[in-house]
Image: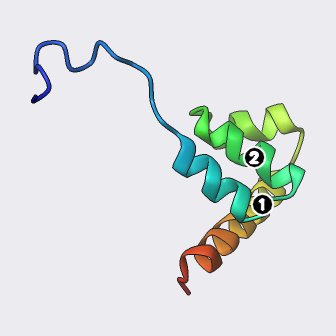
Amino acid sequence: MPIDPVNCFDDERQDYSKVDAIISAINLTNAEHETLNCYMSGWKQTQVCLILGITRGALNYRKSRIRCKYNAYIGGN
């Protein structure tokens, strides 16, 4: 049965099991994991730096490491 277009947004439950599996598989450090959680929560770079008490350079390094691990997982360059 097709989804009712009027009520298609009533069910706000999301299945994040695939995302959780990928995050688990790429073996993030605690620092990388907390950084990713901040971005997944919608925070901006300035907010993340303030909340985590780190510099932009440190934040950019963490993001770079997350990207590298993710790319290695999916077989990218």
Front position in the image: 28 or 52: 28
How packed mark 1 is, by other alpha carbons closer than 10 Å (few <14, some 14-19, many 20 or more), is many
Task: Look at the image and tell me in which quarter the N terminus lies.
Answer: top left
- N-terminal-most mark, 2 or 1: 2
Res. 62 mark: 1
Q: Which residue is mark 2?
A: 35
Amino acid carrying label 2: it is: Thr
Residue sitting at x 71%, y 33%: 47
Instruction: State which quadrant residue 14 falls in.
Output: top left
Residue sitting at x 66%, y 43%: 45
- Hey, which residue is sitting farthest bottom in the picture? 77
Colour setting: rainbow
Front position in the image: 24 or 53: 24
Q: On the rendered structure, is 69 left or right of 2?
A: right
Q: Say which element carries label 1.
A: helix
Q: Is residue 63 shown to the viewer in this render?
A: no
- Hey, which residue is sitting farthest front in the picture? 1
Q: CA distance from mark 2 to mark 1?
A: 7 Å
Q: On the rendered structure, is 15 left or right of 68?
A: left
* Circles 2 and 1 in contact, beta carbons < 8 Å: yes
Residue sitting at x 21%, y 20%: 8
Instruction: State which quadrant residue 75 falls in.
Output: bottom right
Task: Look at the image and tell me in which quarter the C terminus lies.
Answer: bottom right
Q: Position of residue 35 (x, y in %)?
A: 75, 46
Q: On the rendered structure, is 52 left or right of 39?
A: right
